[in-house]
Amino acid sequence: PEWWTRPIFCGWGEQNRIARQVGVDPTTLSRRDRYDAWLDVLASHGVVPGTVVIDDRWQTTYGRNEPDPERWPDLRGWIADRHARDQRVLLWFKAWDPEGLPADACVTDALGTPVSGDPTSAAYEHILRISLRDMLGPDGLDADGLKVDFTAQGPSGDGLRRVGEAWGVALLHRLCELVYRFAKEAEPDALVVAHTASPLFTDVTDMIRLNDLLRLSDPDPVAPAVAQMTHRARVAASIEPGMLIDTDDWCMPSLEEWRAYLAAKPALGVPALYYATGLDYSGEPFTDADYAAIRAAWAGYEARRVQ
């Protein structure tokens, strides 16, 4: 679908920016009022994304993905309003997390304590199908797709128990296959974005996300943002001709590097913007010139996209 390639706004960068300012967990800032405020700021500067990603955590439990009624009252209505503005909405999905799941839907340790969801369990499969129907189906929230995250957090180690035989990469593929199949059952045009940059996963991924930037707080020296993400984009592009790429945007160490990467994104994939008012890591606010740069980068991208 044409909308899959429109510029993306994801609120995770702003959630972290505010969290640093007020000293709270960024997941508590996935809120309807916050997202409205950030999107209003962007719109006031002529920046209107085609797709909006609601990030961690809009849901009460990671295992069942029910909207949090305090943070996201009437999420279905909010999504409908965005549709009326010709915008699409993706919901963040945390892979593997057993929160809210019964033990028979989970990989467990020797004591029976849930460690992760178990994609080989019929109980988990049933819960996941209902969850995705409620998230994406026309009688549910009617969202337009998923940002699948934490795929690397699969179960590992001795003594863990599961229903089936699949393990390691095979178990991850089983999980991704279920998510992808149930998403498409609920909404045939659903966009599934994941950071599964491997030929083994092209059948269960619509768009590859380049993932979080290595940051200055990491122990080893890191390459500038443009160098890092250009390398990742080349790896992703080599997996399958024409594979869509979500360029990501987090966590930028400085406005200087963010500005350089903003200009580079249109040549790498679908531009993604994680900030509306400024950066989280450095605390630097956006200037009018930065909003103008976003408009220019997106306009150039759109001109090439529609050709």
Image: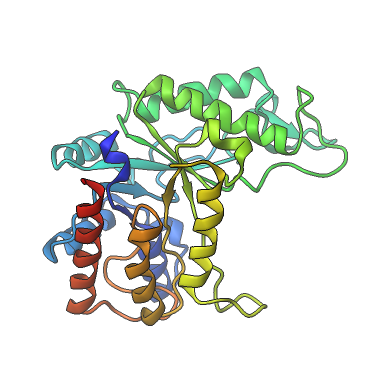
* Image mark count: 0
Q: Can residue 39 be seen in this view?
A: yes
User: Residue visible at 48% across and 46% down?
Assistant: 208
Relative to 112, is 307 above or below?
Answer: below
Q: Position of residue 275 (x, y in %)?
A: 32, 65
Q: Position of residue 272 (x, y in %)?
A: 35, 57
Q: Position of residue 178 (x, y in %)?
A: 56, 26
User: Residue visible at 50% across and 77% down?
Assistant: 224
Outermost residue on the right side: it is 158
Q: Is residue 4 left or right of residue 288?
A: right
Q: In this view, does 150 lie to the left or right of 284?
A: right
Question: Which of the 4 image quadrants contains residue 116?
Answer: top right
User: Residue visible at 61% across and 24% down?
Assistant: 124
Relative to 104, is 287 above or below?
Answer: below
Relative to 246, is 46 above or below?
Answer: below
Applied colour scheme: rainbow
Q: Is residue 205 left or right of residue 300?
A: right
Q: Nearer the viewer, residue 280 or 206?
A: 206
Relative to 46, is 244 above or below?
Answer: above
Q: Is residue 96 visible?
A: no
Quarter placement of the N terminus: top left
Q: Position of residue 174 (x, y in %)?
A: 64, 29
User: Residue visible at 36% across and 79% down?
Assistant: 255
Q: Nearer the viewer, residue 2 or 8?
A: 2
